[in-house]
Image (cartoon, helix red, strand yellow):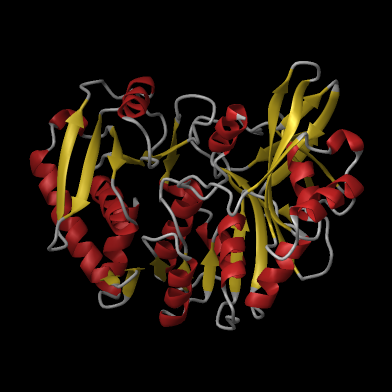
Amino acid sequence: MNYYELLKKWGNVQPEKTLLTVDEENWSYGDMLARVSKLSQDLAAGLLPSLYQGSVLVEASGAATQMAAFLALQAVKIRPILLHHGLTPQEKAAILQENQLQGILKVHQDLTGQFDWSIYATKQDSPVHTAEDILGVLSSGSTGVPKVMYRTYASWAGFFPVQNEIFHIRQDSRLFFHGNLSFTGNLNAVLGVLYAGGSLITSRTFHCRQWEILLERNRADVIYLLPTKLQLLTASTKGSWPLVRTIFTGSQMMSHCHIQNVKAAFPQAELIIYYGASELNYITYTICKGEKRDSRNLGRPFPGIGLSVRDGIIYVDTPYHVSGLAKPFTVRDTGWLNEKGELIFTGRREAWINKGGVKISIQHLENELQEITGIEQAAVIPCPDALRGNNIAAFLVKDTAIAESTIRRAIRQNLKPVEIPEKITFLTQLPLNDRGKVDRRQLIAQCQQK
C-alpha cells in the first residue's frame, strides 16, 4: 500500500469533492488523481530503469505540485523525498551523494495546469532496504548535510486512526496549513487528511490577511500551524473564528499570553499542543483549557506510545518510527515526568548556553522572556564571549505600544542576573525558515556581525 493507492481509492469514491485549495485554485480528488496518473505515466515512460525502486529528491514549489510529484513517484514505485526550499546546488549535490540517492526530479506547473518535469540521475546504486520503505523525509540539516530518513506506509498510516481521532480530522474536515511539505509536520498532516478523505486549504503567500480570507471562504474547521505562524495569525486577526473547532500545533513552546490570544481568536477551538520528532512521529499531547499552566508541560503519551526518562534524557518506544531505529529511541531531548505521568520538556541536550560554567536552557529562557508583558516573541542564541565562553543574545518582538526601555527594565526585574542577555535586539518579526521554525542561522549571522 502507498499514498497513491489511497488517492486512487478516494478519487473513485468522491471525485468531485475538493481535496486541495491553494488560494484561488481548487483541486478535486478526481482532478488530482487524473493529473497524478498522467504524470506517473509520463515518468514511467521517460525515467531510466535504474531509478525503479530507488530514492529520488523532489524539487517543486507549491503544495499542489509537491503533492502531485510525491504521489506520482509512489505510483511508479520510486521513493520520493521532498526537498527543503532555499538549498544551494552544492547542498543538493551533497544530499544526493551522502545519502546515496538515485536522482533529483524537478517538477513545475505550466500555464495550462499540466506538469513539466526533468530528471537528473546520479547513477548511484540504491542501498538495500530491509523494510518496505515507500518515502523519505529530510532532517533539518541544522548541523550538517540533511540526512534522509525512510518510512514504511504503516509507520504513519498505521497511526492515522489514533491521531485523527485526537485532532478531530474526519471525512468532512477542512484543514488549513501553510508551508513546505518537506517539513514532516506538514506532510504528516496532509497525508492524515488524505487518509480520512477530507479537504486541505493553504496559500502560496506568507500573508495573514490572505489566510483569514481562506479560512472564511472555505469554512476551515481545523488548523495546523507551528506556534510562530499561529501567533502571527492571531495577532493579525481583528475578529473571531467560531467555525474552527480544533487547532493542533507543536515543535515550539507556547506562552500563556500566546495561548490566551489563540483562545480569544478561536473561541470554539480545542487547542492541542503536541510533542513529536521527525524520527518518531507523535509522542505526547496536552489540551489547553485556558488556565495558567507550565508551558514546559507537553502532556501524556498518545495511546500506544511508551515514554521513559533516564538521566534526564527522554526515550520513546513506538512502532511508528522511521526505518532502522532501535527501540526505545532518543533524539537527545531532555525532560522529566511529573506525578501525573506528564512530560515536562526542558529542551534539546545541546540547546544550552554555558555562561561562565553556569548552564542555561535556551528553551527555558525563551519561555521566561515570552511570559514578560510586552514581549510577543523571543529567540535566544549563544554568542561568543572571551571571558565566559558564551554569553546570551536575545531577539525580541515586542508590543508596539510598549517602549524598549520598559521591556529592558522588565527583563532585569524578572530574570536571574545570570540569565539576563548581554545583547538584546528588537525585531518587527523573527525570521522563519521554509518549515515555519525560527531561522537561527540568520540570527547567529546577525549576532556575529555586531
Where is residue 376 shown, x and y percent of the image? 69, 58
- Residue name at image x 28 percent, y 72 percent: 26
Quadrant holding the C terminus? top right
Q: Is residue 60 above or below residue 333?
A: below
**Residue lying at 75% horizontally and 23% vertically, measured from the top left:** 390
315 to 249, vertically: above or below: above
On the picture, is 410 further left or further right than 436? right
Q: Position of residue 212 (x, y in %)?
A: 48, 74
| Number of marks | 0
**Depth order, front residue of 212/305:** 212
* Residue nearest the viewer, comparing 108 with 231: 231
Query: In x, y percent, where is residue 186?
Result: 47, 54
Q: Is residue 356 left or right of residue 303?
A: right
Establish if 18 lies above or below 97. below
Residue in front for this viewpoint, 225 or 236? 236
Q: Is residue 257 above or below residue 242?
A: above
Q: Is residue 311 visible?
A: no
For residue 411, side relative to residue 351 (left or right): right
Q: Quadrant of residue 96?
A: top left
**Image x and y of residue 170, in percent:** 49, 72
Give the residue at the far left of this rendering: 45
Residue found 49% across the figure and 67% down from its top: 208
**Residue 428 falls in which quadrant of the image?**
bottom right
Q: Kindly give the residue lying farthest to the top in the view shown.
A: 386
Asked if one can make out residue 387 in the rendered structure from this viewpoint, the answer is yes
